[in-house]
């Protein structure tokens, strides 16, 4: 769990928060106090910037006076009883009062009230108007909208009363505005009711006279039609004609069926007339007794003929006589069949004639029905027109009589029950309470703004940020150096100051990880330029040298070297020349500080990464390890180039530098991940340019009161104040 996390203790069983919970709460409180102290100028600016203008606005608000009048609005009982809906319906009373409220707030009435009291002459409603200003000019000036903002009209529950309230900074203006508005409303509504009633009665009377003429004309047209077309018995005749049409339709259907049956029988007889076998199968033939008798005789004679021809021969006299009888019987059978066929044909012709007669009668009856229907339609149209005209006339007549009765009394009665009186004291505003609210809001804003900025600020500011976000130990905080702090440059001295002590702490931390007598290689790098890595490398080298160890400060930043500037040395020949083997180790230069030597960057090299990756680097370092206890690499930053990751492979330890209030968490984490990908062993992080005065890390009370005084000492009667802290 992080240091700034608040743990909520479970109190369901009556327990008390344990010590870790209290520590977490105190940590959050201390963190918030540190943020407020560090950003106190922002908090003060927000507080002053909000409270001062808001407080001035609150305290300079003018007083508000309220004047109220009460009016009574009632519908006429006589009018209600005459005009009420027979079914008991009608608009609810709420709609009526809402209508009156909107009329009371309507622009025509408001304009007349404003003109009556000359509202534009007051300071609060001042407008460039005069006594002769028209209603249109008043409306364009915007005073109406301002008037309505100060006006409130509310109905009193369960009554017919309306409260009309007006608020203004001048009590006289508030009183006059309410009284003028209610008086104008009462006067205008009375005039409007009289004018509306008169106009409506005139319109109704005109429509009544016109409708009377239309009714007379439609009734005369109906009587004329009835007389000329005998339309009195249209309905009775229509029933008879329709019944007759139905009967004829049935008779025609029956005659057509009978004709079709007889026609089919006749056609069948004609078709099988020459086919005896088919003829014998017809039902009409089978049912004819004469034909059946003749057919029997003919069959018997033919059988006898066959027997005699076999016994006596074809010339026998008896056989010749028998054949004469057969011929005679055959002719009688044909005659009888022809007679039957003719009889069937006559039945078919008669049925066809009956069908045609009935069809002609049906068509005639249809024409009669059509004519009767047309007469009925004309008669019905005239009758409906007359009925409609009569209904409209009777309705207009009723409305005219009703309006005549209702016109004697007003539709609604309006009384001013209570006129507005001049208010004696203002109702607001409550400046003292609102000013306290402004202060409270300003304090909340002043506290919330720095905390919000802190949450949105992703820069590293304290060792806690390093431990939480980078998951590495913070070895020391190097104080920010102010101009005029008493230093001869950014180089540590032997004086007991917080600045010098920071590098002693770094020296102790990195020395604890060394394994003598092998020389230690230490890479000093950062995420981005201008974070103070070169300054840290220089001062750490000085601190190690002051501890009696031989130190080589190697400027491995072949692109933008700065080490030679700190010691006022020549940049070349140097490190790059040794890697190219165009110089020897004599290029290592001594300094004024015992045991501290510097290998400057050397001649510029555009392919610095390739030069550092050459095998010559390992050979050079092996040779230098025999002469020095420490080799400090001042390398380029990790972000822009790959030089630091290459050097990290030959340096067992890496010291990472971040600038307080400058390096972002994302940039630092990305750089550390790149170093770890190159198998770098990061011993810790140095927080450079720490503003101890304003940042006030977690021990700020101790640091401010005692920690700084710890470095105050007397030497030869001279007091040394701590330097490097801002």
Image (spheres, rainbow, N blue to C red):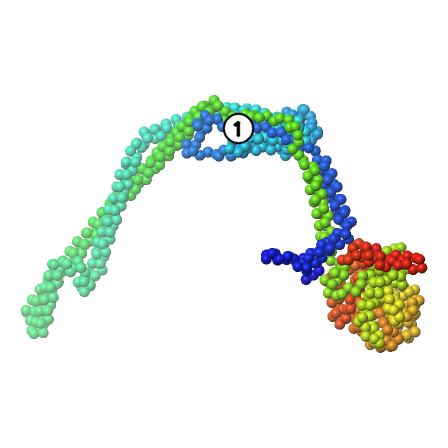
- Is 286 placed above or below 158 here? below
- Is 697 placed above or below 76 here? below
The residue shown at (28%, 36%) is: 237
Is residue 1 in view? yes
The residue shown at (65%, 28%) is: 424
Is residue 186 in view? no
The residue shown at (53%, 26%) is: 414
- Seen in the image, is 362 located left or right of residue 565? left
**Which of 406 and 157 lies nearest the eye of the viewer?**
157
Q: Outermost residue toward the left?
A: 318
**Which of 631 and 21 lies nearest the eye of the viewer?**
21
**Which of 116 and 137 lies nearest the eye of the viewer?**
116
Q: Position of residue 171 (x, y in %)?
A: 66, 28
Q: Position of residue 390 (x, y in %)?
A: 39, 29
Quadrant where the N terminus is found in the figure:
bottom right
- Seen in the image, is 371 located left or right of residue 441? left
Q: Quadrant of residue 150?
A: top right
Q: Which residue is mark 1?
A: 73
């Amino acid at each position: 769990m992080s240091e700034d996390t608040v743990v909520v203790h479970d109190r369901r069983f009556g327990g008390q928060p344990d010590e870790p919970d209290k520590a977490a709460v105190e940590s959050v409180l201390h963190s918030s106090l540190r943020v407020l102290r560090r950003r106190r100028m922002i908090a003060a600016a927000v507080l002053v910037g909000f409270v001062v203008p808001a407080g001035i606005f609150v305290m300079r608000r003018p007083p508000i006076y309220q004047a109220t009048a009460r009016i009574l609005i009632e519908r006429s009982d006589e009018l209600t009883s005459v005009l009420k809906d027979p079914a008991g319906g009608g608009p609810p009373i709420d709609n009526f009062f809402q209508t009156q409220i909107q009329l009371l707030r309507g622009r025509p009435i408001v304009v007349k009230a404003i003109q009556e009291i000359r509202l534009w002459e007051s300071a609060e409603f001042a407008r460039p108007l005069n006594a002769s200003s028209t209603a249109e000019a008043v409306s364009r000036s915007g005073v109406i909208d301002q008037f309505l903002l100060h006006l409130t009209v509310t109905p009193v529950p369960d009554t017919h009363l309306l409260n009309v309230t007006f608020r203004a900074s001048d009590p006289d203006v508030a009183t006059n505005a309410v009284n003028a508005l209610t008086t104008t409303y009462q006067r205008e509504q009375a005039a409007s009711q009289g004018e509306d009633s008169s106009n409506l009665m005139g319109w109704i009377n005109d429509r009544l006279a016109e409708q009377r003429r239309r009714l007379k004309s439609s009734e005369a047209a109906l009587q004329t039609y009835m007389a000329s077309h005998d339309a009195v018995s249209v309905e009775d005749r229509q029933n008879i004609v329709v019944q007759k049409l139905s009967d004829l339709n049935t008779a025609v259907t029956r005659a057509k069926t009978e004709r079709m049956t007889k026609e089919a029988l006749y056609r069948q007889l004609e078709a099988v007339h020459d086919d005896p076998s088919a003829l014998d199968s017809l039902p009409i033939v089978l049912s004819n007794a004469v034909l059946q008798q003749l057919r029997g005789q003919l069959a018997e004679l033919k059988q006898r003929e066959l027997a005699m021809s076999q016994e006596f021969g074809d010339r026998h006299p008896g056989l010749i006589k028998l054949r004469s009888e057969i011929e005679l019987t055959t002719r009688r059978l044909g005659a009888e069949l022809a007679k039957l066929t003719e009889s069937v044909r006559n039945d078919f012709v008669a049925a066809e004639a009956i069908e045609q007669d009935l069809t002609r009668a049906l068509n005639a009856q249809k024409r009669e029905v059509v004519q009767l229907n047309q007469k009925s339609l004309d008669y019905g149209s005239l009758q409906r027109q007359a009925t409609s005209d009569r209904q409209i006339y009777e309705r207009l007549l009723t409305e005219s009589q009703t309006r005549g009765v209702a016109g004697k009394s007003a539709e609604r009665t309006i009384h001013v029950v209570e006129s507005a009186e001049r208010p004696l004291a203002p109702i607001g505003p409550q400046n003292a309470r609102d000013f306290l609210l402004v202060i409270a809001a300003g304090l909340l804003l002043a506290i919330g703004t720095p905390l919000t900025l802190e949450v949105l600020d992703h820069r590293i500011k304290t060792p806690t940020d390093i431990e939480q976000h980078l998951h590495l130990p913070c070895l020391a905080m190097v104080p920010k150096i102010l101009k005029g702090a008493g230093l001869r440059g950014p180089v540590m001295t032997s004086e007991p100051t917080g600045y010098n002590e920071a590098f002693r702490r770094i020296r102790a931390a990195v020395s604890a990880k060394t394994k003598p007598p092998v020389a230690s290689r230490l890479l000093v790098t950062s995420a981005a330029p201008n974070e103070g890595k070169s300054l840290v490398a220089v001062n750490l080298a000085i601190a190690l040298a002051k501890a009696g160890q031989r130190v080589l400060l190697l400027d491995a930043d072949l692109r933008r070297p700065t080490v030679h500037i700190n010691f006022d040395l020549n940049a070349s020949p140097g490190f790059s020349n040794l890697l190219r083997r165009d110089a020897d180790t004599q290029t290592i230069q001594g300094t004024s500080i015992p045991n501290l030597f510097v290998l400057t960057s050397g001649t510029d090299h555009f392919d610095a990464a390739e030069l550092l990756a050459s095998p010559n680097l390992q050979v050079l370092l092996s040779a230098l390890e025999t002469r020095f206890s420490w080799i400090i690499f001042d390398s380029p930053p990790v972000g822009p180039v790959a030089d630091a990751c290459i050097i990290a492979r030959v340096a067992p330890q890496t010291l990472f530098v971040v600038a307080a209030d400058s390096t972002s968490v994302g940039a630092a984490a990305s750089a550390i991940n790149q170093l770890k990908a190159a198998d770098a062993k990061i011993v810790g992080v140095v927080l450079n340019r720490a503003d101890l005065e304003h940042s006030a890390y977690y021990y700020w009370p101790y640091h401010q009161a005692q920690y700084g005084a710890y470095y105050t000492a007397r030497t030869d009667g001279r007091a040394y104040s701590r330097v490097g802290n801002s």
